Image: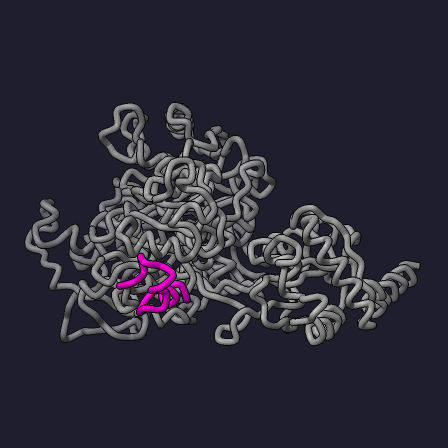
Amino acid sequence: EWLTIASLWVISLLLNIVCLNEIRWCTISEPENRKCNDMKTSFAQAQILPSLSCVSGESSSNCIQKLTSNQADAVTLDGSLIYEAGKHNNLKPVVAEVYDQDVGTSYYAVAVVRRSSSITIDNLKGARSCHTGIERTAGWKVPMGFLMDSGRMSVMGCTVPNAVSNFFSKSCVPGADKVNYPSLCELCSGSGTSKCNLDSNEPYYDYNGAFRCLAEGAGEVAFIKHSTVFENSDGKYSLQSQWANNIISADYQLLCRDGSRAEVDKWRQCNIARVPARAVVTRPEVDGSILYRFLHEGQQRFQDGSTFKMFDSTAYGGTNLLFKDSTVELRPITFQTYQEWLGKEYLQATQGIDCNPDQLPKMLRWCTLSTSEIWKCAAMASAFTNKTLYPSIQCVSADSTADCMKLIQEKQIDAVMLDGGDIYKAGKMYGLVPAAGEKTSADDIFFSNIYYAVALVHKNSSDAFTIHELKGRKSCHTGYERTAGWNVPIGALIRRKVIRPDGCNIAKAVASFFSKSCVPGANQKNFPPQLCELCKNNCDSSDSEPYFGYSGAFRCLAEKAGEVAFVKHSTVFENTNGNNTESWASGLASSDFQLLCPNGARAEVTQYVDCNWAQVPAHAVMVHPDTNIHAVFGLLDRAQEYYGSDDNSEFKMYDSAIYNSKDLIFKDSTNKIVPVKEKRTMENWLGTNYVDSIEGLQCSSSTGMLLDLRPVFMRQCQVC
């Protein structure tokens, strides 16, 4: 029976695709409806099929809904609405407008500055900005969306105008709310009530006006389209626009997405985004070729007709009705998905600005793991409320990070800060994604929160062994299940098949590979005793074992108990050259040690960027993939403006001393919360080497001991 029903559905779908005997065009205004009815009459007289009917939709959004509910078949939309129609309503673009044979079905949104300035896309904060108008594509949506999506500008609670007014020192954004956001209209030059209007009464309105704002020195950057500079320079407009009389295009440059600059004629290579042309959209089951053939025949007869003109709206007292008046041709779209049509850069910008305040949670439910963390979270919630930060914080207690992950997956809570191993588990097992990360001083090798896991050895010309000659050596580890001392190096060696576990028994495999080791915390029942043989005291995972932790593993190497130490890149510097005053470190020089590289080479300890086993990522705020990550980062970024300094007496985001603990919610060494930028998945955040190391520790056999596979990021054997 279900086969019969499915067959009937397919037949019905095919009939709908083939037999579109009437095209119902959705119009968004009364003038557009009049033009549509004239097109209907003209096409019928020319015997163009299928027949056309006009459906009044009153707005583009209403038309999208009518297409979705099968009350209409086609409507022409711009890029941002194509995004909305594709993402939320599964509509597809099928026919594109062409405006200029030079660039085809698109134009380019660019950021222009004076050649004499030192501005780049990376130091725009605090600059004076010129925009074509509020909610305009090239002057607002694309550049502001890009700045938000790339993390250069944060937005709290979806209030983009507020974010822009905080980011730029002064602006001219015609049409902006000059009462609530006066800085957005401060640079505009209109007179009286006309100042900052979204019309020609404001001299700095539209493409030419935004460039004029830059040319006259009011602003330092103008967000316009690629052709605007050439249309207003080198004498082209000297008669019509006196302000452009002496403008030379060579005096201006473009800001590129990668932080560089380029000449204004290099807009194809240096732009904010290619802006796709408007396109006719329809439902997924409608054959787009029918719509194209219908419109193509129409444009052949009525592109410049005497009775009806498809690409002219003057007869109806409007502009860009049904199609843009500047359209010169309609073309079929080959890849009919909104993602393909919009393109990567435009899609990125649109995603950045795609924020509906009504869809944001009123509270961000934060997962905490201890009584001390609950105390700090409660203080944070109160402090955020005092500054009217949105959304507000609600503190939720859980027993473990795994509990937090499960609750977020079930949408019972919203966010938790996790380290690298738990980030892997959160992404792999629960589908969570990073929303923001921690960062410390990038230039501080001692305290950087992003560090490198390295293998440290003595510099010895008579025994310069490499990774390929590790078998049988004596090894020093920071501790069992520790990232740099166990998870990364052992995972990498297993992944490379240097160490070959028998089933799940990784501890036994490591004990068989190295002759002796000190792995603090491996003093457990059923663990091979060789893993603790080099330890100085009790092999405990605490300071009672002198060889525990980074400094302890290095001490194990420095005292020549072991021949290789798995530590982080800064460990050798922290304990040599007089930086450690303990007696065992006296006289140690960093130049007496070297690194073992995964490629089989040795390197100096200063070359850790190129010779490491993995870059260990910063902690990250992990959320459900449906959560708006820009809103999460926007909240934390605004909060750290008030509470990111240790000088604040009300609340300190990055200090846990008052709660008699450390690293509560955020690490105490955090300098600032940073955006994830393009690293929006667990894999991208952690990096290939780190993920490979973790996956090297996964069990792949039904034999062996489940007891042995207990890293925090993979507590269950996949098959065992």
Quadrant housing residue 250: bottom left
Q: Is residue 661 left or right of residue 205?
A: left
Where in the figure is residue 428, as x and y percent of width and height? 53, 54
Q: Quadrant of the N terminus?
A: bottom right
Where in the figure is residue 159, as x and y percent of width and height? 46, 38
Q: Nearer the viewer, residue 57 or 678?
A: 57
Determine if the magenta segment contains residue 5.
no
Judged by its main secondary structure, the magenta piece is loop
Residue 3 vertical position relative to residue 293 in the rendered view, above or below: above
Which color scheme does this rendered protein use?
one colour
Determine if the magenta segment contains residue 239.
yes
Labels in figure, total: 0
Q: Is residue 462 visible?
A: yes
Q: Is residue 642 left or right of residue 604?
A: right
Q: Nearer the viewer, residue 38 or 288?
A: 38
Q: Is residue 430 left or right of residue 295?
A: left
Q: Nearer the viewer, residue 386 or 715?
A: 386
Q: Quadrant of the C terminus?
A: bottom right
Q: Is residue 526 visible?
A: no
Q: Nearer the viewer, residue 566 or 123?
A: 123
Where in the figure is residue 550, as x and y percent of width and height? 25, 50
Q: Is residue 26 left or right of residue 651?
A: right
Q: Image point 25% across, 34% down: which residue? A: 645
Quadrant housing residue 601: bottom left
- Magenta residues (range): 227-246
Where in the figure is residue 707, as x and y percent of width and height? 49, 51
Q: Image point 41% across, 38% down: which residue? A: 162
